Amino acid sequence: MQHGRSIRRLAGIALTTALALGPGTAARGAVFFSEYVEGSASNKALEVYNSGAQSVDLAGFEVRVYANGSATATGTVNLTGKTVPAGGTLVLAHPSATPALLALAQQTSGTLNFNGDDALALFANGVALDHIGQVGVDPGDAWGSATFGTKDQTLRRLQAITAGDSDIGGVFDPTRGWEPFPLDTFSGLGQHASALSTVPLPPTLALLPAALGALGFLRRRSPR
Ligand SMILES: [Ca+2]
Ligand SMILES: [Ca+2]
């Protein structure tokens, strides 16, 4: 009897906690770059991914280009008007890209004319979310190497990565968190997968496993 009441109380706490969280928790922090195409001619593309559980309206989001080591943006692609579904992607491409690449894009912009030594950053309402390349640094030809770098290659984010790197002036090492593919690889555009989000739990949710653990403990001790 005593245990039955405890179980009901704990279950009530768990349910209240789940309801209090509501929709949209940390969704914005879960939008990041998942693919980068630095191909031949104007075959340039970026894939933006939403690892969150809710779709994200990209109003106020933009991609900023920092050409040739510039510390300030030399171009901006506004993503307002687009939405990226939960677990889905938005593909951006240069308007002069080959038709096979254009067919995979939901938005085009001539600002996407990067060629290996240009840093890119994703912003939401002026707050940095992620970057490719190191803002304010001229790497010479590219970041990384000729076989694993930002020039003449496609880079795809590893599934283990669940959020962007907001330190846009920080060192960019493509071997940390990315996988390289040959020049003009477009086959990965339009879909991406990541491990579950590792966004820190709010304090109330962090209590949930403990509450559920106690529930299981009491169940095991309860007479059948
Ligand atoms: Ca350049
Ligand atoms: Ca992809």
Image (tube, rainbow, N blue to C red):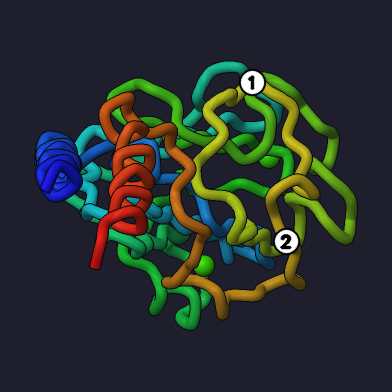
Callout 2: CB less than 8 Å from ligand 2? no
Q: Which element carries disc 1, helix, strand or loop? A: loop
Q: Is residue 19 above or below residue 157?
A: above
Residue at x 37% of width, y 46% of height: 213
The residue furthest right is: 146
**Residue 13 lies in quadrant:** top left
Q: Quadrant of residue 146?
A: bottom right
Question: Percent from the top left, x then y, of residue 134?
Answer: 68, 29
Residue located beneath label 1 in the image: 169
Q: Is residue 24 left or right of residue 190?
A: left
The residue carrying pointer 2 sits among few (fewer than 14), some (14 to 19) or many (20 or more) residues within 10 Å by Cα, namely some
Residue 183 shown left or right of residue 202 in the figure:
right
Tell me which amino acid carries mark 2.
Glu
Give residue 82's mark: none
| Mark 1 crowd level (few <14, some 14–19, many ≥20, 10 Å Cα) | some
What's under tag 1, amino acid-wise?
Gly
> How far apart, in angstroms, are the residues tagged by discs 2 and 1?
21 Å
* Residue, disc 2: 179
- The nearer-to-camera label among 2 and 1 is 2
From where the camera sits, is residue 62 visible? no
Q: Position of residue 125 (x, y in %)?
A: 28, 25
In percent of the image, x 35 and y 63: which residue is there?
A: 87
At x 41% / y 75%, what residue is drawn?
Answer: 104
Position of residue 157 in the picture relative to residue 80 (left or right): right
Find numbered disc 2 in the image and state the secondary structure of the residue it sits on. Answer: strand
Figure check: 15 above or below 157: above
For the question of whether residue 169 can be seen, the reply is: yes
